[in-house]
Image: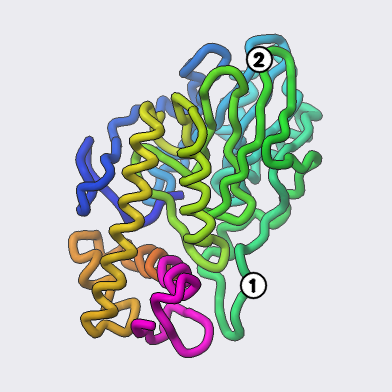
Amino acid sequence: MADETRTQGRAASDADDVTFDREFVPAHGEAITVAPGVQRVTCGNASPFTFTGTNSYIVGAGSTVALIDPGPEDTAHFDALMQALGQRTLSHIFVSHTHRDHSPLAARIKNATGALTVAEGAHRAARPLHAGEVNPFAESADTDFVPDIVLADGASIEGDGFSLSGVHTPGHTANHCAFALDGTGILFSADHVMAWATTIVAPPDGSMGDFMASVDKLLARDDRLFFPGHGGPVTEPRSFLRGLRTHRRMRERAILERIRSGDRLIADMVRVIYARTDPRLHGAAALSVLAHLEDLIEKGLVTTDGPPSLFGEYRPA
């Protein structure tokens, strides 16, 4: 699920700090081989937040395989995945996080195949709701999903021709997990890192501090290729991650500049910082600003009366 950042074709963002690639042909419903032992099947659930749809990945070179991110409850996608599996046995269903564009179809596929579900854990918020606060993405959460196997950070599950390790990457959600295909340099980065846009970080489910720490965590790795939850691959992960980190830091500086210039409300900051963004996406932009403000308050650079909120007033600390 992506946030307010949008570009057309292959172009730089407003801040010119990271380049996004929207040139992706999804081939909805078809199993496309994207690497040895890896097939991608893209669901037809295109939207402003999901780009061309959710990518599901079938992993394994033998008669038994794993599935990463089954996707939304969608009959056409279910049929496409079952057809792609063919006579192969599905042993595990890996779920990167519990947004409704990623996890709900796990239940139907589990019932059809007997595969075990694997994830970091059930859905939870990054922090408790404040008094009177409403979670803007509550309906996007798949609270019914509970994994059969809770995958610890760094733990691996081996199958016939594959070994997948969990790489906990909270930020987009508290339970977000990427999966490394051991011995290949391939990381299934889900919604944490995507080539086409930055991911949305929306409190209380998301945390900007956690997100930035997860970016640093991936920078410390030596992966050579990311397969994300939406859009095409990230072919130069380290440079892309550095650009993504710069992009977020520049956004943070822009917010601090607006506050020091006298802006007190998130709505006023959004109108200036996101002046070139489609106004229909200003709601998502406001949530991103709130996530940055929570992080800035934690760092002692900004203050507000009471808990930070979309409608609070913010001042330099």
Q: Residue 173 placed where, x, y %?
A: 57, 55
The answer to if 315 sits in the magenta stretch is yes
With respect to residue 131, does 291 lie above or below?
above
Mark 2 neighbour density, 10 Å: few (under 14) some (14–19) many (20 or more): few
Q: Which residues are magenta?
A: 291-317
Residue under pointer 2: 86
Q: Quadrant of residue 156?
A: top right
Secondary structure state at the residue bearing disc 1 = loop
- Residue type beneath disc 2: Gly
Residue drawn at x 76%, y 30% is 112
Give the mark nearest the N terminus, 1 or 2. 2
Residue 256 seen from this side: yes
Secondary structure state at the residue bearing disc 2 = loop
Q: Residue 237 placed where, x, y %?
A: 40, 32
Q: Residue 160 placed where, x, y %?
A: 73, 14
Residues at badges 1 and 2 in contact (C-beta under 8 Å)? no
Residue under pointer 1: 128
Nearer the viewer's eye, disc 1 or disc 2?
A: 1
Q: Quadrant of residue 20?
A: top left
Q: Residue 167 placed where, x, y %?
A: 61, 39
Residue drawn at x 47%, y 30% is 227
C-alpha separation, residue under disc 1 versus residue under disc 2:
44 Å
Name the foreground residue: 182 vs 312: 182
The answer to if 261 sits in the magenta stretch is no
- Residue type beneath disc 1: Pro
Mark 1 neighbour density, 10 Å: few (under 14) some (14–19) many (20 or more): few
Left or right of 315, for residue 36 = right
